[in-house]
Structure formats: structure tokens, C-alpha cells
Amino acid sequence: DAGVIQSPRHEVTEMGQEVTLRCKPISGHDYLFWYRQTMMRGLELLIYFNNNVPIDDSGMPEDRFSAKMPNASFSTLKIQPSEPRDSAVYFCASTQGLDYNEQFFGPGTRLTVL
Amino acid sequence: DAKTTQPNSMESNEEEPVHLPCNHSTISGTDYIHWYRQLPSQGPEYVIHGLTSNVNNRMASLAIAEDRKSSTLILHRATLRDAAVYYCILRHWVNTGNQFYFGTGTSLTVIP
């Protein structure tokens, strides 16, 4: 298996622009997570899905952030409009089963908002 | 939130054992203790987890205090490839599923 795939790996955009980050989980995994990592706050859980349904989005910072999972093999995290404080590394992770122990992380997308 | 406290950074000499501490005084009876590590420019990866008893695997050992308010990740012989940020996490059950709370972790430097 290729592991969790994220695209793009790097994104540089200007304030006010829409940004879409993409994730393909490991085949067969039924949980998908989006995290954000910054120096100040470390790794924060934004939202997670089970069987394509959002379960907990309490970590989403504000209405500018939205996430979707239209099918079991694809998810997006969208920021509209983007702001400089959104600059961070965004990770997607997936796992299988309700009683999971191990999450498998993708390589991350480094977002820079100018 | 189920939170943990770790030192910001630690150093170790190569080929010596490393003990990475973690405090989790608010742990509940059903919270599992997990450790992940993050190598430079990569996503976190699973290391080990446990509930009450000490655990061993090919990567490390996990020693859990009797009252479960603290734990220690043990790398038996540090190598340069072990230089990473190590996260101690509580896996907390809520009715919507397991939740993981990563903090800022401990940055481990291995000195050749």
C-alpha cells in the first residue's frame, strides 16, 4: 500500500485566496483525521470522519475551515478565505476500526499564506 | 481534555538508553497511553501503547506507574535515527469514538 497520500506537499498563497488540501486514506480504513501543526500549538486535531461521515469537528478553528469526504478514498480540507495565521503543516491520517490504536499519517501539506 | 505534560527537549548519547517521561495526572480508568514520534519533515508514527501493565515491542518499552499518573518511554539504545519529537498521548473514549490529544512533545537530540 502507498500509505496515506496528501497533495499538494507545499502550497503558497496570498491572503484571501481559497485553499484546498487533499487526502487519500489507506484503502480499507474507515476513519480519517485532519490535523494542523504549528510551533506554538503543536499538533491539533481539526476534524475526523467515520465511514465518510463527520463525527467531531470541534477542533475546526472557525467557519473559514470546512472538510468533506465524498467517498471512502478521498477527503478535502478547504480554507476560504485564507489568512496568514493559517500557515501551518496540515496532516491527514487514517485508521481502521472503532477500537484503533495506530493512526497512519500522511507526509503533510505545508501551507504558507502571505 | 485528557492532557499530558512532557519536557520540551532532552539529549542522549548514541547507544545509551533514553528515558522519556510523561505526566498524565488527569488520566481516567479507561484512557490508554500512547506514544508517537515524528521524524523531521515527516508525519507522526506509532511507537507503543499500554493501559496498566508495562509493554515491550521492537521499537521501545513503556513503563507505566502503578497509579497511572505517569509513564516513561524507554529507548534501550539510542541511535541517530531516533532523533525526533516524541509525543505522549492519552487515548480518551467519548461516545463518538476514541480521541487523541497530541501536545507539543519532547524533542530528542541524539549526540554521536
Image (cartoon, rainbow, N blue to C red):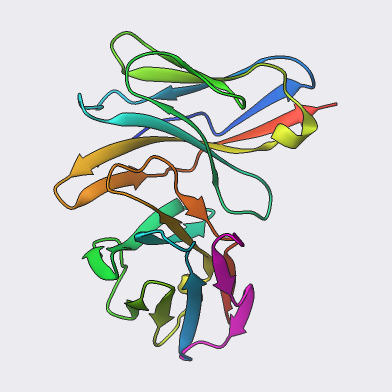
Tell me residue B45's x, y (percent): 55, 44
Tell me residue A91's x, y (percent): 50, 62
Q: What stretch is highlighted in magenta?
A: A1-16
In the picture, residue B50 is in which quadrant? top left
- Up-down relation of residue B65 to residue B27 (above or below): above
Tell me residue A106's x, y (percent): 55, 60
Quadrant the N terminus of chain B occupies: top left
Tell me residue B42's x, y (percent): 64, 54
Q: Is residue B82 magenta?
A: no
Q: Residue at x 26, y 30 (%)?
A: B31
Q: Residue at x 53, y 71 (%)?
A: A87
Q: In this view, does A91 lie to the left or right of B41?
A: left
Q: Which residue is drawn at 37% across and 71% down?
A: A72
Residue sitting farthest toward the right: B112
In the picture, residue B58 is in which quadrant? top right
Q: Which residue is drawn at 40% across and 58% down?
A: A29
